[in-house]
Image (tube, rainbow, N blue to C red):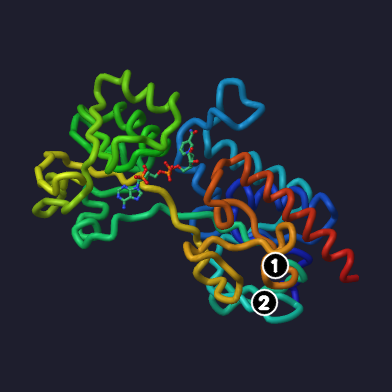
Amino acid sequence: MDNQYDVIIIGTGPAGYTAAIYASRANLKVLNFEGWQPGGQLTITTTVENFPGFEKGIDGKALMAEMKKQAAVFGTEYVSKDVTKVDFSGQPLRVYAGKDEYQARAVIIATGAKPRKLGIKSEEKYWAKGVSACATCDGFFFRDKKVAVIGGGDSAMEEANFLTRFASKVYIVHRREEFRASDIMLDRVKSNPKIEIITNKEIDEVLGTDKLTGLRLKDTKTGETSELAVEGMFLAIGHTPVTEIFEDVEKNKLGYILHKENTMTSMAGVFAAGDCVDHRYRQAITAAGMGCQAAIDAERWLENQS
Ligand code: NAP
């Protein structure tokens, strides 16, 4: 069988690529599944200003492209498929992409996280008809229009600032008065004349006809409702880990994979790194660091097995 590897890495964000660099440089035969969003979340961000080594920042897509090329130098193979099923019940570990089966002695899960949704029906109705979770992807469509960004973290601040390149006005709608966002990001937003912050409001309903025309807001203190006329709503309310297919791997109640020994999960030979594990730091650099740890742990584990 051709599809046999020492290590299969699932996911290609900073965690997956760094694991690939380390594992393939350790002379292991490595296959990296690129997954549903090749390059991960950084490919839909703008400039990454806090990844060490880039005084002027670096475009997120460019950073991921460099990591991918770096892992390829050491022999990492890539496959542009989604993993649909896994079987970690014994050796070899089995990973499936549809009908295709791949085998490995160790697996590193680095599937990251995807944007969280509000969970209201009208959000689905107007998805891609005004509702988006990616300003970088969709901001362009809102030239000279009013839009709202939902959330109070760094992502919301970043998205709002970015959207002012196109939109005539950007509202940040946040459900509390305090912000999770860092001071520097919040200050940038506050000094941007195109941005207005609305606090203590949650989204009661997305309004529209064939496309989004406004939001019904509900005051989180008084319960009063009001309407905000916008043509776009950008969600920036955090993320959920992409871990559904790993049914037998132990996770916490939010779905984040748990480490049992260093970066090894509850399944022997299965390691995990990055945003599918980490709900606290969620940075490119911390994901990359954990990807490195997982590759070193996998390598040592494999050595002990043989
Ligand atoms: P986050 O920090 O978890 O913030 C999520 C925000 O969404 C919170 O303000 C939360 O409100 C709000 N929220 C959650 N569920 C909601 C709901 N159902 N309805 C309304 N609001 C809701 O997530 P993030 O902003 O994506 O940031 C994640 C991590 O990435 C952070 O560590 C951040 O620093 C980092 N990051 C860094 C940069 C940068 O440095 N350039 C850029 C982006 C992200 P509450 O506060 O009330 O819970």
Residue holding disc 1: 270
Q: Residue at horizontal 38%, vertical 27%?
A: 186
* Badge 1 amino acid: Val
Labels 2 and 1: the sequence-earlier one: 2
Q: Residue at horizontal 19%, vertical 58%?
A: 122
Give the CA separation, mark 2 to mark 1.
Answer: 8 Å
Q: How many marks?
A: 2
User: Cβ–Cβ below 8 Å for labels 2 and 1?
Assistant: yes
Residue 138, percent across and down? Answer: 32, 42
**Up-down: is 186 above or below 99?**
above
Residue 164, percent across and down? Answer: 29, 27
Q: Residue at horizontal 70%, vertical 67%?
A: 270
Q: Nearer the viewer, residue 270 or 145?
A: 270
Q: Taking 49 as reference, is 196 left or right?
A: left
Q: Which mark is residue 134?
A: none
Extreme residue toward the front, this view: 221
Q: Circle 2: is it few (<14), some (14-19), or many (20+) Cα within 10 Å?
A: many
**Up-down: is 7 above or below 280?**
below
Q: Nearer the viewer, residue 84 or 193?
A: 193
Residue 278, percent across and down? Answer: 57, 52
Question: In the structure shown, which secondary structural element does the residue marked by tag 1 occupy?
Answer: strand
Q: Residue at horizontal 49%, vertical 30%?
A: 47
Q: Quadrant of ligand 1?
A: top left
* Badge 2 amino acid: Phe
Q: Nearer the viewer, residue 222 or 106?
A: 222
Disc 2 CB within 8 Å of nearest ligand 1 atom: no
Image quadrant in which the C terminus is located: bottom right
Q: Circle 1: is it few (<14), some (14-19), or many (20+) Cα within 10 Å?
A: many
Q: Which mark is residue 88?
A: 2
Q: Taking 134 as reference, is 210 left or right?
A: left
